[in-house]
Image (cartoon, grey):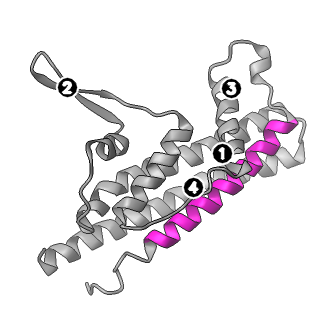
């Protein structure tokens, strides 16, 4: 690959990286604001629901951004993506129907979405990275998404209640997510040669 093309790709990845950082900051500020309001009135169900929704929006937003970055990172590092990788990144499944290629949405359950997205992001940066999904924090994060799903699609009044245990799980799950994400970004960042490629 030509040096100028490599520089162009590096600049594009750097720009997307900045967008990732800025977007995380906005979503994180929502979480922090909701947490402050909840601490002022810990029995207030509105702020409990808001906190759970904000935490899940942060996690889902980050995963979406990582998927968006993956194809460009793969090109830069000359990593060949499989059909499954592309499906994870685009959330679309291609198939043939009556001789015509079509596509349809391909959404994964949250736990699988997180695992596959982190795996894909590490792969596109040629990083071998182990994430400890057996830790309690990962289960707590998945439980938080179950709580959020009940809030978004309630089948009854009790589905709108966020218990003390659910708030504790949200806190534990988000700490696990923050740690796993920080470690992943740190390892992948070591591969990015922005300082090596002059503008």
What's the distance in space between the residues labelled 1 and 4, CA to CA?
Answer: 12 Å
Magenta stretch contains residue 5: no
What's the distance in space between the residues labelled 1 and 3, CA to CA?
Answer: 13 Å
> Which residue is the site of mark 2?
102
Q: Secondary structure at mark 2?
A: strand
Residue at 69% of width from left, 13% of height from top? 155
- Image side of residue 121 versus residue 2, left or right: right
- Image side of residue 99 versus residue 58, left or right: left
> Which residue is the site of mark 1?
55
Q: Secondary structure at mark 1?
A: helix
> Which residue is the site of mark 3?
151
* Residue 169 x, y percent position in the rendering: 77, 43
Vertical order, 86 against 73 (above or below): above
> Which residue is the site of mark 4?
26
- Image side of residue 95 versus residue 23, left or right: left
* Residue 80 x, y percent position in the rendering: 23, 57
Residue at 62% of width from left, 56% of height from top? 132
- What stretch of residues is rendered in magenta? 164-188
Marking on residue 98: none
- Which SS does the magenta portion mostly show? helix
Sooner in the amino-acid sequence: mark 2 or mark 3: 2
Quadrant of image for the C terminus: bottom left
Query: Disc 2, disc 3: CB below 8 Å?
Result: no
* Residue 89 x, y percent position in the rendering: 35, 46
Magenta stretch contains residue 181: yes
Instruction: Categorize mark 3 by other alpha carbons within 10 Å: few (<14), some (14-19), many (20+).
Output: many
Foreground residue among 143 and 167: 143
């Amino acid at each position: 690959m030509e040096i100028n093309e490599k520089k162009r790709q590096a600049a594009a990845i750097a720009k997307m990286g900045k967008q990732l950082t800025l977007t995380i900051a906005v979503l994180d500020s929502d979480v922090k604001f909701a947490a402050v309001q909840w601490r002022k009135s810990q029995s207030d169900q509105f702020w409990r629901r808001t906190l759970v929704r904000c935490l899940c929006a942060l996690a889902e937003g980050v995963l979406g951004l990582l998927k968006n970055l993956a194809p460009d990172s793969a090109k830069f590092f000359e990593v060949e993506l499989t059909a499954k990788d592309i499906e994870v990144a685009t959330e679309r499944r291609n198939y043939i129907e009556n001789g015509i290629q079509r596509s349809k949405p391909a959404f994964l359950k949250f736990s699988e979405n997180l695992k596959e997205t982190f795996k894909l992001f590490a792969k596109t940066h040629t990083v071998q990275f182990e994430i400890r999904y057996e830790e309690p924090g990962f289960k707590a994060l998945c439980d938080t998404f179950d709580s959020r799903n009940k809030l978004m699609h309630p089948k009854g009044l009790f589905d709108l209640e966020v218990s003390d245990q659910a708030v504790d799980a949200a806190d534990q799950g988000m700490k696990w997510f923050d740690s796993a994400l920080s470690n992943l970004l740190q390892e992948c960042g070591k591969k990015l040669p922005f300082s090596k490629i002059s503008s």
